[in-house]
Amino acid sequence: MKVDLLLINPPITLEERYGAFASVGSQAPPLGLCYLSAILRKAGHAVKIIDAPALDMELEPTINEIKKYETKLIGITATTASIIRAAELARAIKQSTIEARIIIGGAHVSALPERTLEEFADFDIGVINEGEYSIVDLVACFQNGADLSTVPGLVYRDGNDIVLTAPRGLIENLDELPFPAWDMIPDLATFYKPAPHSFFQLPSSTLMTSRGCNGKCTFCARPFMGEKYRSNSPEYTLAMIDHLIKHYGIKDIMFYDDNFLLDRKRVTVICEEILKRGYNISWSCLARTDVMAEDFFKLIRKAGCWQIAYGIESGDQTILNNMKKQAKLERVEEMIRRANEVGINTRGYFMIGCPGETNETIDRTIEFMRTSGLKEFHATFCTPMPGAELFNTAEQYGVFDCDWKKLGFWDPVFIPHGMTKDDLVAAHRRMFRKFYLRPAPIARYITKVITKPSIMIDIVKAGIDVLKYSMSGYVGRKFKRLFSSSEQSPF
């Protein structure tokens, strides 16, 4: 089959992406590739997507699938966590009988455009930041034999030189973009599923209705989608929801916007229309506590919101200030309380090992997560990612092992001054023990299994993995201490 561009989500396993928490990892549709495919199709180009992770394809089967298509352009998407896998795929393509220019897109090349092409010789062209209009111009440029330097938002090889073209402005009106081409990926309801804690019922899918973030957090790679908040209109958002319900039978949606609840007027219209149209759906979202309206909870709960995931990061105010989080713990507790009061589940995302972290600040975080009223909890290691302020300043605050193979949030690569890697791992495991091995969380999960038997296997598997991780080494240490104490005892 001949196509103008073949887009690929490179092979990477849940174990590689989530480590010991593979069972609680999500297999989400590649919305970025779906948007690119949709706008290319609208422009009259033939395009296909190969989503290797969704199809559980390793490198060789992916190459065999690529060979089914006749194309001169292959595009691969990659975050920093998957850049090595993307490079391995590019190398395998170049070593095969496939003759095509290879385009790399996504967060990693957007943050480090020239460095990415310097380090990975098999990438020919990079698309920087929002790629919808850049990719259309790029394909047309190849078809017309035009000069790549005329296309904004690219980095490319010109002989031995690496050329960076003029930056492309942000897409101001997101409604100009066609709906993601969900029809070009494997069936949404069959091949994709959020993590067990992220859906209320199945089938479930993710949706992104805004781009950009108004925050200044030092750990966040904001430039990828821009620092200016832009959103789809309520009408466009509702049309996407309607499409997912009618064409794919979706019953649950995870709004993956950085802060879905930022624009109160927009969300109010969306919620009122969901109620008016009688959509029988559940939904969840991410939110920042510092910008959320205090009297907003009743409406969103009535419209189907069952969970809000707050990026809390730390239970120590000094750590939050160090990271320019612009959040006060008193406000965080208030937002958790208000959500809980109307029956919205509250989930807190935390990071361990931030600049200035000590055993004392970790203890304060553990105390906060246990007493704040949170119903769900998750923590990762603070990881300086390309594009984030912390990526450039990390070595001022500790030791940073900048190895692309390790930058995935599940193994500490940044060790704050005064701490060790063993300290962070032990504290990370302790966090999970202290939160989940309590009567209330255990009872909630038992209730969930009883009331929703269709997701029993997912919950049980996740519970076993969390238990194994959190208890690893703990029992042995307890016995060692007990044995040491008994040797010193006079009895």
Image (spheres, helix red, strand yellow):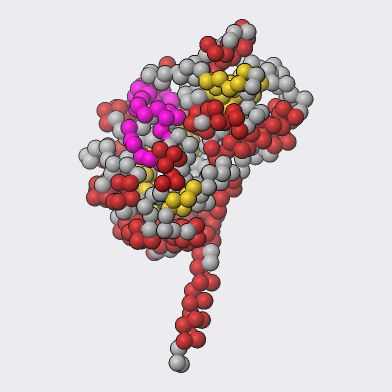
Which is more toward the observer, 95 or 209? 95
Q: Report the quarter where the N terminus lies.
A: top right
317 with respect to 247 (left or right) = left
**Horizontal placement of 382 versus 234: left or right?**
right
Q: Which residue is drawn at 40% across and 38% down?
A: 389
Depth check, front residue: 26 or 183: 26
> Could you say where residue 351 lies in the image, as x and y percent from the top left?
41, 50
Residue at image point 34% right, 27% down: 229
Asked if residue 283 can be seen in this view, the reply is no
User: Exactly how many numbered labels are in the figure?
Assistant: 0
Span highlighted in magenta in the image? 214-242
Please check the rendered image and state whether residue 232 is part of the magenta-colored stretch, yes or no. Answer: yes
Q: Residue furthest bottom?
A: 491
Can residue 430 be seen from the camera position used here? yes
Q: Position of residue 385 (x, y in %)?
A: 47, 40
Q: Which residue is drawn at 32% across and 57% down?
A: 368
Q: Residue at x 65, y 39 (%)?
A: 56
State the residue in front, 404 or 8.
Answer: 404
Q: Is residue 457 magenta?
A: no
Q: In the image, 251: left or right of 303?
A: right
437 versus 77 height, above or below = below
How far across and how far down the image is residue 69, in percent? 71, 22
Name the one closer to the observer, 201 or 194.
194
Q: In which quarter of the image is residue 52?
A: top right
State the image coordinates of residue 236 (x, y, percent, origin top left): 39, 22
| Quarter residue 303 falls in | top left
Is residue 440 found left or right of 484 in the rendered image? Answer: left
The single residue placed furthest to the right in the displayed view is 97
